[in-house]
Image: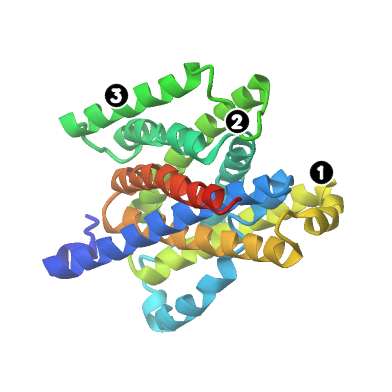
């Protein structure tokens, strides 16, 4: 019988782990979404580049991974999965991550940060269903209430005639953004449940180095696929022009992409960390809470920018 090692932690140690991962998720996701919207607003137009930066920051995780990586003896236990099994697992997860990121990139291109975040809130409803079937998660009154409220909120967004995208995006493209974001939310929820199932059935060990390992290897696969998409689509040819015409300058263009990549990795560590410390459903609850923070942050940022314009 599989037993989580976190049952042996003291209560304050467990809550400290949870708090750290919650901070990573909320801060990382809010910053990443706002930076992604900033990229589009200032002249960026490459969906594949916006997809690539969501996973391309994985090298920053290699330093803590090497420091925390267990010794060779500890990592070769009889319960460890084979190399082929791990390779297949991380490849499948990487493909799902790449597809999910692409859908999110299209959604953010045609939606405002606030609308995008509100539609993403439907991921909790999807995750409740996937957790029930894949992770044997029991439905409670709190979960059902959350599902109903968030689903109704998303429905109101869908039928709101005034909910145009940024800079007067036509309703047709707004609908594409809505559907892509909705699909991305469903795929993201499936991904979280699949990750929890992987910890329980395949990896069968829960250490922070395993969290980093999963994030690094899946990001490698997703980044490779996104790079292939960037070149196959021909969007790479426009990157030099994007940099030259970017609204706040070439240096700002590079820094926007770099910090977007870093903040997405911070968010991802928090997401995966909460999955293996608590559950995929709890991770999604916090992610949904983060989505509520994003519109507030957007209001503060854009309000200050407007006040600065004379």
Q: Nearer the viewer, mark 1 or mark 2?
A: 2
Snapshot quadrant of residue 276:
bottom left
Closer-to-camera residue (261/216): 261
Residue 77, percent across and down? 37, 73
Q: Residues within 10 Å of mark 2 (few under 14, many from 20)?
A: many
Is the C-beta separation of discs 3 and 1 under 8 Å? no
- Residue marked by disc 3: 148
Mark positioned earlier in the residue sequence (3 or 1): 3
Please identify the quadrant where the N terminus is shown: bottom left
- Using residue 197 as the reference point, say whether residue 143 is left or right of it: left
Q: CA distance from mark 3 to mark 1?
A: 39 Å
Res. 233 mark: 1
Please state which of residues 237 and 186 is positioned toward the viewer in this rendering: 237
Residue 241 visible in image: yes
From this view, report whether residue 97 is shown above or below residue 164: below
- Residue 124: x %, y % from top left: 35, 36
Please give the residue where the numbered disc 2 appears in the rendered image.
Answer: 165
Residue 16, by quadrant, is: bottom left
């Amino acid at each position: 019988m599989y037993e989580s090692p976190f049952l042996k932690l003291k209560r304050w140690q467990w809550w400290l782990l949870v708090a750290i991962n919650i901070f990573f998720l909320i801060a990382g996701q809010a910053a990443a979404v706002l930076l992604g919207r900033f990229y589009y607003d200032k002249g960026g137009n490459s969906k594949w580049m916006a997809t690539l930066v969501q996973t391309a920051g994985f090298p920053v995780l290699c330093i803590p991974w090497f420091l925390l990586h267990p010794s060779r003896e500890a990592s070769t236990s009889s319960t460890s999965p084979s190399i082929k099994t791990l390779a297949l697992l991380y490849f499948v997860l990487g493909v799902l991550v790449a597809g999910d990121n692409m859908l999110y990139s299209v959604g953010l291109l045609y939606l405002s940060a606030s609308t995008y975040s509100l539609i993403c809130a439907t991921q909790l409803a999807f995750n409740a269903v996937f957790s029930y079937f894949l992770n044997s998660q029991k439905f409670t009154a709190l979960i059902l209430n959350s599902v109903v409220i968030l689903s109704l909120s998303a429905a109101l967004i869908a039928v709101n005639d005034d909910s145009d995208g940024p800079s007067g995006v036509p309703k047709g493209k707004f609908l594409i953004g809505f559907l892509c974001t909705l699909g991305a939310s469903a795929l993201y929820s499936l991904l979280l449940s699949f990750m929890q199932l992987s910890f329980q059935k395949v990896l069968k060990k829960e250490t922070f180095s395993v969290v980093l390992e999963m994030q690094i290897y899946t990001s490698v696969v997703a980044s490779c696929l996104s790079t292939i998409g960037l070149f196959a689509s021909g969007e790479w040819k426009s990157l030099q022009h994007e940099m030259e015409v970017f609204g706040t300058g070439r240096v700002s263009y590079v820094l926007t992409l770099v910090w977007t990549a870093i903040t997405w990795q911070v968010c991802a560590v928090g997401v995966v960390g909460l999955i293996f410390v608590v559950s995929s459903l709890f991770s999604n609850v916090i992610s949904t809470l983060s989505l509520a923070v994003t519109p507030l942050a957007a209001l503060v940022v854009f309000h200050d920018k407007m006040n600065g314009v004379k």
